[in-house]
Image (spheres, rainbow, N blue to C red):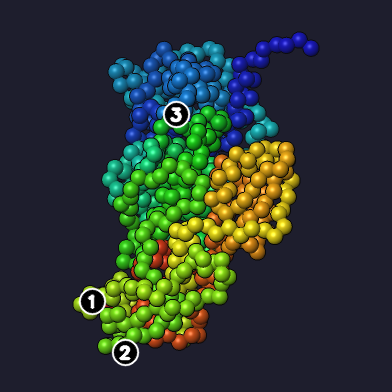
Amino acid sequence: MRIHALPPQLVNQIAAGEVVERPASVVKELVENCFDAGANQVTIDIEQGGIRQIRIRDNGCGIVKDDLALALSRHATSKIASLDDLEQVGTMGFRGEALPSISSVARLTLISRTPEAECAWLVSADGTEKNFDPQPDPHPAGTTVDVRDLFYNTPARRKFLKAEKTEFAHIESLIQKLALARFDVGFVLNHNQREILHLKPATSLTEQEKRIAAICGSAFIEQSVKIDYAASGLQLHGWVGLPTFSRGQQDQQFFYVNGRLIKDRLVAHAVKQAYQDVLYHGRHPVFVLYLTLDPALVDVNAHPTKLEVRFREGRLVHDFLFQALHRSLAAQRPGGEGNIAIDHQSLPDAQVQVPKPAVAPAPLQASLPLDLAEPPARTGQPAPSAYRPTARPAVNVPEQILAYAKLYPSDDTPPATAPSSAMPPLGFAVAHLHNIYILAETADGIILVDAHAAHERVTYERLKQHYHQSAIVSQPLLLPIKLQVTAAEADLAEREHAFFHDLGFELTRSGPETVVLRATPALLAKTDVDRLVRDLLADLLNDGFSRQVEEKINAVLATMACHGSVRARRKLSIDEMNALLRDMEQTERIGQCNHGRPTWVRLSHQDLDRFFMRGQ
């Protein structure tokens, strides 16, 4: 068979197979063009879920008459002109495929006017890239793209479309995501001549939070943390939901890179790790986050839909995201909940080592019970220096663990007790209800604390701090383990020998596809080290980083903390309860236990009054 050139319409229809999946795909491409045109108002009119009509109007810069035909031709764009431009794309679109692809599977009309033009000009297209005859039109400055009868000439594609309600739901969800990407742009979304969404431009923080509340719900803003981090040329800002405010699905996770909505495996992994030991099993965090970095450090030309990107420094981005989210969640303590901007120092460059604690360790205290030094002066408020930590460990652990987890030195200084004139954030204990819950009175209401869950988090955080501050103790194996791996993994083990040594592994290469494990971290002596090393090598080879070892160590420490914490049904004295409250105020991630369950709840005066209808 002879080689022949395909007709332009067929070429555009092939491209449309990648770009235009459903009506929402058309809306995405056209609205992103509005962003690139500098518009601050976009109106989207939808008929029959977008199958019958999609009309999008903006007040952007418009297109001059002589460029209208080019705008509807393949690989014609005003956004890039050279390879250098492609390697640092700063616009939403750049491929020059959207309009000709859409016109090849629908009836498309383009009307545009520049501010200095006397009138607008209208052209129609059918994907053939021929017979363009601009006609004058009384359109205001800006551009309108009218797309009708989607897939009218490709019936097989049209059969795959869902019901009108389903297709419009995809469009509405998309507009909400794009509205979170550009707070400076107003949006109006109409469906079948009925207004569905009307968002005004949001310039102030209050207006931005109102837009987020309109899309994600007011509870998201109330239960989120405002963060702003910058380091190593990267900046992350936005809102992350508290671990107690989570969802059963990933429907409220919005991540933007240089204003572009993306879905990325590296980003998802970093977020998952940051929430690792504070989120309840099977739940998913919620967030609206914006990452800003040099466009040259991210490749947006990974897929025609432009939802996927490639980071040129993946390890740097991963560790930056993990540290920023990890620290923002750790900083949430009683008395400081809500939206805060973390006062941060410049974060270190990307590292694969187990991270150091984000804050200085709090004064140490043994697990409850606590030995009283003297009787309390008052019931309800502890006297200064009313307790002293016991010198014995509260958990029965092997000698090698105690080597780097000496938690209970006899000369520990107890945390300062709040003066009687000042009410601490968690107040003072009043009673131990059912020998499970601590009831405490605060300045503005009461709180209830699950004593076991709270003490479990306190113990766990202290174990982690002491473990990570000490050198990892390595335990030699009685019989070395020979592992058969791939040549690439053997090369990696040989090249990263120092990294494995820092983690407590003695891993050496003994052949082209063989490595020998001679020592492991003492804390992981009873785990499946064979599988752990293989998983670690696979992660490092595929992603350039791994937290497998840290996860395993934290799991062991979490078990130790759980068994070493005060048990339910164990009666606590007032002073023991106050000691736990003071420790909670100094502990990171105290809002949840190691399993993600909440540790305490607050009821304000207003809540109590509402229960009893006081003042109504």
Say which residue appears at 46% left-offset and 52% top-offset. Answer: 355
Front-most of residues 63 and 36: 36
Q: Which residue is mark 1?
A: 419
Q: Nearer the viewer, mark 1 or mark 2?
A: 2
Report the disc number at residue 32. none
Rendering coords of residue 251 (x, y %)? 52, 51
Rate crowding at label 1 as few (under 14), some (14 to 19) or many (20 or more) other CA atoms within 10 Å: few
Q: Are marks 3 and 1 in contact (CB under 8 Å)?
A: no
Q: Are marks 1 and 2 in contact (CB under 8 Å)?
A: no
Q: Is residue 505 above or below residue 438?
A: above
Residue at disc 3, secondary structure: helix
> Which of the pair 549/566 is nearer the observer?
549
Q: Residue most toward the left?
A: 421
Does the rendering let one see residue 554? yes
Query: Which residue corresponds to mark 3?
Result: 296
In the rendered structure, which amino acid carries the disc numbered 2? Pro
The alpha-carbon separation of the residues under discs 2 and 3 comes to 66 Å
**Residue positioned 47% across, 40% down in the render:** 316
The residue identified by callout 2 is 375
Determine crowd level at label 3: few under 14, some 14-19, many 20+ residues with C-alpha closer than 10 A. some
| Residue at (33, 34) in percent of width and height | 40
Name the N-terminal-most of marks 1 and 2: 2
Circle 1 — which element?
loop
- Relative image position of residue 591 (x, y in whole percent): 42, 66
Q: Position of residue 443 (x, y in %)?
A: 26, 75
Name the quadrant containing residue 421.
bottom left
